[in-house]
Image (cartoon, helix red, strand yellow):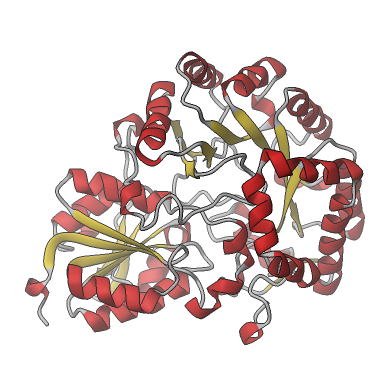
Amino acid sequence: MRRNSLKGNAILFIHPLGYRPERARRDISRLANLMPPLGLASLSAYLEQRGIETRIIDCFAHPDDYSLLRRALREFRPSFVGFSCTTSNFLDGVRLAALAHTELSGIRTVFGGPHVSALREAIVRDFPEVDFVVVGEGEETLAELIAADGEGAERIPGVACRRKGEAVFSGFRETALELDSLPFPAYEKLSGYPAAYRLPIFNYPRTPNSSCISSRGCPYACSYCDRSVFRRTFRYNSAAYLYEHLKYLQQRFGIRHINFYDDLFTFNRSRVEEFCQMMVDRPLGMTFNCAVRAEHVDSELLIRMKEAGCWMASLGIETGDPELLAQHRQNADLEMLADKVRVIKKAGIRVKGLLMMGLPGETEESIRRSMAYVYSLPIDDFNLARFTPFPGSPLYERIHELGRFQEDWERMDCLRFCFIPHGMHRERLEELFTEFYKRHFQRPGVLMGYVAMLWRSPDSWKRFLLNLGDFLRFARSSQRLGREGGDG
């Protein structure tokens, strides 16, 4: 089949699953949280405005990737197929790219996302299935690449590709997009939206609910964070754009609760104040969650957020050991963090703490300090991630000096210990990880909070009871996919 038989100015987007689709039913991460691929939906809306036809297959929401991909390729016949990849699902994307090349001769494969943005030339050098890598923000780069039909890609800013058999990178784009100029993501391109997606269990009051991104990047430089896509830039939508976005979601899809998937929702105080005033003056009947950084919240702002519908705020704590925190984060002030947890709680907003275990320098003593710190605070919920050194993070370049690191991309999902700090053992880390969670859920205040979820988030209890066996299995074994195929 020749390339000129393919549909020009068309791209099929794929969000890879990361493992064999028959195992999706047992994936605890899918049962607990299934977020729409907002990046792909945003790209789709931008390209459609420029006359480029798009479709999206989300293998997380619809895991039957072989048949879905084959059918879409044969019916749609796009010139390009694009993959948005994290580290853990990149190799699955490569597998699907090979399938696309087999199904449609002449099709071009494009990869984007944090993993490939960090590794750039190495990806096209080491993986022949990958024709192009879009580095950083993808809208303008991808539009130009498709308009040129892939020709002269080495001259398009933001592209890694092959030229005369050598892997080359054209360099970063000099200017960033104005976020308020972008269309709302093409949610309608996501099959089954919004019912096919679900926020983390016990993290919302009502359905249907969804996620929204109102900023890009972060001005801070924590040791564990990847900066390969947005680098050190930080931009955000205006309050007016944000309000209209939520209004659109409510009117078009009936959304009743939103999780803002921003690193620093409250960084610009005036934006948040203006947005909250709009939500009070012109109510949409919606509630929302957001992530905040301690330096950018106070009692007055939190009271306004509560009035506007803020239901839960997530706060990055990372570790309760002051010396360890100082090694990896700016403004490492545990007393300030504790004070802000109490202020959030006092405002009537549910508090979720975000922590990591297994950072370089971690010891059993530092883990015990983290436990004591968390248990001293009125935290309603918390997420304890296993530290993973991702390409693009400051720690990644010297991680082998700091402990034992098994760089198995498919297992680098923050749900398994791929890195073991000096002086620690994987088995002991797993024991302490399980203990951390068990002791938290045994606290009377926490237990009563989950009892209150019977009327505050009834759908969460329904999901929990329907999948009780899988949740109990995960609590006992910490294995994401169960024992099928021998993978934990």
Residue that lies at the very extreme toward the left in this rendered image: 4
**In percent of the image, x 50 and y 36: which residue is there?**
256
**In percent of the image, x 54 and y 17: which residue is there?**
273
98, above or below 237, in the image:
below
> Dividing the image into 4 quarters, which one contains the N terminus?
bottom left
* Res. 172 visible in picture: no
Residue 478 pos. (x, y %)? 74, 69
* Res. 231 visible in picture: yes
Q: Nearer the viewer, residue 12 or 145?
A: 12
303, above or below 456, in the image:
above
Residue 116 pos. (x, y %)? 43, 62
344, above or below 322, in the image:
above
Q: Nearer the viewer, residue 252 or 332?
A: 252
Q: Is residue 238 left or right of residue 80?
A: right
Q: Is residue 314 left or right of residue 260?
A: right
Q: Is residue 86 left or right of residue 32?
A: left
Residue 165 pos. (x, y %)? 26, 76
**In percent of the image, x 12 and y 66: which residue is there?**
7
Q: Quadrant of residue 353?
A: top right
> Dividing the image into 4 quarters, which one contains the C terminus?
bottom right
**In percent of the image, x 81 and y 48: which residue is there?**
324
Residue 367 pos. (x, y %)? 86, 54
**Image label count:** 0
